């Protein structure tokens, strides 16, 4: 079984203009001659819009992913963009995702994504989302203008602990905003402060090869309620990377297996603290397919390079950890897969 613990499914009405323009700025500079933001916006990037997750369900089937967890980002009111909200309100966005999860029971689950800068309303939305709509946890995006260790986040952590749900926090590169907010070190204090009551999922594990994964391991080494989630690590490992067939990069699979081996050795729980994820649709599908195949066949592939990963360790990373931490019903997932 394979559970993808980190995906994003969007429709246009969920995205504020500042984020669209930031995406356009990056896309316009991918190759020479550089384009303009306006040219890219005219293309509208329709492959990102996936009403009802219909397109993503087909990709899941093709890649052998049994279930996924949607982790919404509250992009409205980001630092420097106050008042630039998406056409849909943050309540409407989260409620829409929860409706999808009800319809796609056993295939699609979702967290509540809300910015702690929204204050009391953020806590109220989290509670309603979990208690009434069936959401499975909280997603925070620090680089919209706060540190995970800021006291403004603590009412949300307290509510997660009360509700018995985990919190997923972006770590690593800033995605058009400031990376300083999402440095792994800022996850240490809240995880220690809530060490008996709350599971933290470090989205992206600080980043893959060439990024902050070593810093993330250092922070999590003696804090066993921090779980390293591998979303968006794939492009640093699989041939082509973020640029897909435009890239000329080789596979870095041996380096990744060595990285994974170091992770399991450093973390107190070993592979019990590592979670599979993708971060789709932020890179080419062909990279996703190879990433899934790598994990499904990890014992044999790792052995080629002199590493010993047991099937039990692979099962923990591929689905058991996600099911335990996010409280997913494996029988429900199996049943959905038989339909």
Image: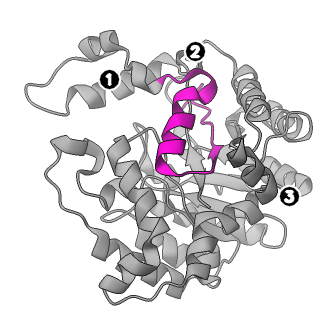
Residue 77: say if magenta. Answer: yes
Q: Quadrant of residue 94?
A: top right
Marks 3/2: CA–CA distance: 31 Å
Q: Residue furthest front?
A: 338
Q: At which x and y percent is residue 210?
A: 30, 64
Q: Which residue shows up at 49% across the image and 54% down it?
A: 231
- Residue 132 showing in the rendered view: yes
Q: Of label 3 and label 1, which has the lower sequence position?
A: 1
Reply above or below: 234 against 86. Answer: below
Reply above or below: 54 against 198. Answer: above
Query: Which quadrant is home to the C terminus?
Result: top right
Q: Quadrant of residue 320?
A: bottom right
Q: Of label 1 and label 2, which has the lower sequence position?
A: 2
Residue underneath mark 3: 161
Tell me the element at label 3.
helix
Residue underneath mark 1: 24
Residue 187: say if magenta. Answer: no
Magenta-drawn segment: 49-78
């Amino acid at each position: 079984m394979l559970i993808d613990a980190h995906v994003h499914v969007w429709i246009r009405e969920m995205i504020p203009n500042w984020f669209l323009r930031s995406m356009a700025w990056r896309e316009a500079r991918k190759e020479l001659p550089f384009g303009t933001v306006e040219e890219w916006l005219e293309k509208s990037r329709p492959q990102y819009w996936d009403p009802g997750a219909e397109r993503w369900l087909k990709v899941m089937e093709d890649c052998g992913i049994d279930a996924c967890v949607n982790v919404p980002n509250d992009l409205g009111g980001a630092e420097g963009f106050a008042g630039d909200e998406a056409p849909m309100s943050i309540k409407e966005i989260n409620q829409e995702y929860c409706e999808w999860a009800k319809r796609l029971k056993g295939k699609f689950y979702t967290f509540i994504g809300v910015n702690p800068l929204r204050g009391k309303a953020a806590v109220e939305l989290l509670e309603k989302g979990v208690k009434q709509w069936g959401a499975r946890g909280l997603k925070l995006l620090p680089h919209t203008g706060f540190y995970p260790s800021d006291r403004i986040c603590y009412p949300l952590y307290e509510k997660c602990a009360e509700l018995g749900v985990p919190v997923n926090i972006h770590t690593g590169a800033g995605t058009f905003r400031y990376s300083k907010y999402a440095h792994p070190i800022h996850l240490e204090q809240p995880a220690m402060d809530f060490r008996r009551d709350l599971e933290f999922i470090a989205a992206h594990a600080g980043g893959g090869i060439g990024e902050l994964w070593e810093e993330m391991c250092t922070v999590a080494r003696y804090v066993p309620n921090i779980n390293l989630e591998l979303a968006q690590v794939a492009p640093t490992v699989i041939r082509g990377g973020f640029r897909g067939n435009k890239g000329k990069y080789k596979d870095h699979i041996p380096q990744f297996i060595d990285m994974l081996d170091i992770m399991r050795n450093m973390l107190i729980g070993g592979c019990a603290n590592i979670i599979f994820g993708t971060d789709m649709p932020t890179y080419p599908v062909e990279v996703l397919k190879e990433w899934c195949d790598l994990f499904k066949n990890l014992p044999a592939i790792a052995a080629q390079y002199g590493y010993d990963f047991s099937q039990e360790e692979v099962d923990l990373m591929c689905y058991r950890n996600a099911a335990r931490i996010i409280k997913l019903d494996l029988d429900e997932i199996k049943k959905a897969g038989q339909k």
